[in-house]
Amino acid sequence: MLLYEIKVSYERQTGEDNPGKVKETYLVEGLNCSDVEGRLMEEIKPFVFGDLEVSSCKKVQLYDLIDSPEADRWFKARVEMITVEESGKETRKVVSMLVHATTIAHALKHLTSYLSSQDCEIVSLQRSPILEVYRGVK
């Protein structure tokens, strides 16, 4: 799964007032930056007022996405995975995950449940700037 973090800015109707410039971050699955930029434009086109500017597009390495249909926020977790080889040598690797939850407490609960069968340690958990994740290559 190739995921790209895309930061965009554009004008959007922000209520009854005049349109305002917003900056948002999205995570989109795709083949390359051109592919995901085009896909994101299709997804957010109904909300865009004026020009859409892509300020950055970068590939993101994630161990996994833990999705929850009732959630509205994304939290980034850094988890230290611990493996023990047959020789007894212990290897530690820090990986990143995204957890979809309503609060940081719910994110911790989902993450702990997901990791319950693995030998690991949660290093950090914080709110992510990612507004939405678009999965599946079109």
Image: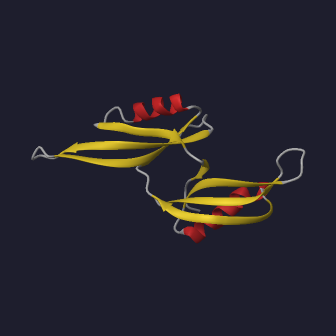
- Image coordinates of residue 111 in percent, x first then y, are 44, 35
Residue that protrudes farthest toward the bottom in the picture: 34
Question: Which of the 4 quarters of the picture holds residue 121?
Answer: top left
Residue at the image position 37 percent from the left and 36 percent from the top: 115
**x 61%, y 54%: residue:** 26
Quadrant of the snapshot with the C terminus: bottom right
Q: Quadrant of the N terminus?
A: bottom left
Image vertical order of residue 93 relative to residue 120, above or below: below
**In this view, 57 is above or below 72:** below
Q: Quadrant of residue 135?
A: bottom right
Q: Position of residue 48 (x, y in %)?
A: 78, 58
Where residue 131 sits in the image (x, y, percent)?
Answer: 63, 48
Task: Estimate the x, y position of residue 50 in percent, counting from the top left.
Answer: 82, 64
In front here: 19 or 42? 19
Q: Residue at x 56, y 68 (%)?
A: 33
Whether residue 52 sits left or right of residue 70 in the image: it is right
- Identify the residue shown where x is 41% and y is 44%: 78
